[in-house]
Image: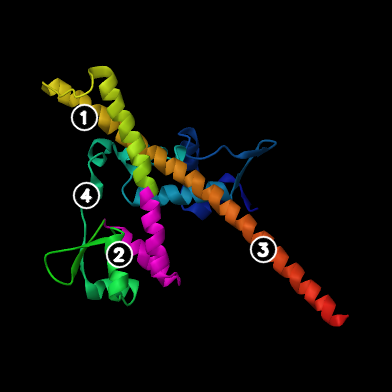
Amino acid sequence: MTEYRIDDLARVSGTTTRNIRGYQERGLLPQPLRRGRVAIYTEKHLRNLLAINKLLGNGFNLGHIATFLTNPGARIGDALDLNDILDEPWASANRPVLGREELESRLGPLDEDALAALIGAGIVTETAEPGRYEAADRHIIGNLARLVAKGMDLAVLVDVQQRFVAKMTEAAEILMTAAHDEVDRRRGPGWLPSSDEDVAWAVGLLGAMRRAGTENAHAALDRALDAALDQELQAHKVAADDRAGAGGDAGGAARG
C-alpha cells in the first residue's frame, strides 16, 4: 500500500496542504494514520482527493461534494435540492422513438419473432408510423445493447427483463397499496378530497411513499445483487472445483 506524507499527497493529487486539511475538517477525507507525530495518508485519501478535484472542476461546490462522499446512498437530487422535481414521473418522459434500422444497429438483426418479443415485453411499442418504435424509457435500449455487445442472447435478455419488471411491478403495488390503505384508515374508504388542503395532503402522502419506495428499492436491490453475485460465484467455484477434480481423476485413470 502506497503511503504519503501530506506534502507528497498534495503534490500527487494536484492540490494544496491547506485544502487537504480543510477537506478533513469538513469530513470529506478520512483522518490520516499516525506514526508518532507524523500523519500518514493512503491511496484512499488520494482517490478521494482526485474525486473532489473532478467534482469541483465540473461545477459542484463543497456542500454538494460533502453529500456525495459522506452519504453513499444519496441521489444527486439530495445534493442539489431537486427532490421535488425528481418526484415527477420521469418513467413516462423522454421516450425515444427509434426506427427498425436503428434498433437492429444496436440489438442485432431482428426477425419478426424477436420484434414481437420486444413489444410483448413492453420494451418497445409500435407507433402510428410503420417501422418506428417507442422505447419504454431512455435507458433500456442502451442497457440491452451493451449486454448484447458482450455476447448475451437478446431473447434471454428480453425474458429476464420481462420477469424482472414483473417483480418490480409487484413491489410497487405493495408500496402504493400501503399508501392507499393509509388514506382509507385516516379518511375512510372512498374518501375524495374536497379542498386544496385535502389534495395537498393526499399528494404529499403518495409522493412520500413513492420517494421512499424508490430509494428503498435501490438500496434493497443493491444488497440483493451483491448477495446473488456472491451466491453465483460460490456455485461457480464449486463447479470449477468439481471440474478440476474430474479432470484429475480422468488423468489418473488414464495413467493407470
Please name the residue that numbered disc 3 is placed on. 239
Sooner in the amino-acid sequence: mark 4 or mark 3: 4
At mark 2, the secondary structure is: helix
Local crowd size for mark 3, using a 10 Å CA cut-off: few (<14), some (14–19), many (≥20): few
How far from the left and from the top, in percent, is residue 228? 54, 51
Q: Quadrant of residue 107?
A: bottom left
Q: Which label is found at residue 203?
A: 1
Asked if residue 62 shows in the view, the reply is no
Out of 114 and 109, give the one closest to the viewer.
114
How far from the left and from the top, in percent, is residue 53? 41, 50
Local crowd size for mark 4, using a 10 Å CA cut-off: few (<14), some (14–19), many (≥20): few
Could you tell me the amino acid type at mark 2? Leu
What residue do we see at 26% from left, 24% from top? 183
What residue do we see at 18% from left, 22% from top? 191
Local crowd size for mark 2, using a 10 Å CA cut-off: few (<14), some (14–19), many (≥20): many
Q: Quadrant of residue 105?
A: bottom left
What residue do we see at 59% from left, 39% from top? 32
Could you tell me the amino acid type at mark 3? Ala
Q: Quadrant of residue 145?
A: bottom left
Sooner in the amino-acid sequence: mark 2 or mark 1: 2
What residue do we see at 36% from left, 43% from top? 170
Q: In the displayed structure, would residue 4 be above or below residue 145?
A: above
Please name the residue that numbered disc 2 is placed on. 118
Please name the residue that numbered disc 4 is placed on. 92
Q: Is residue 188 left or right of residue 58?
A: left
Sooner in the amino-acid sequence: mark 2 or mark 4: 4
Q: CA distance from mark 2 to mark 1?
A: 34 Å
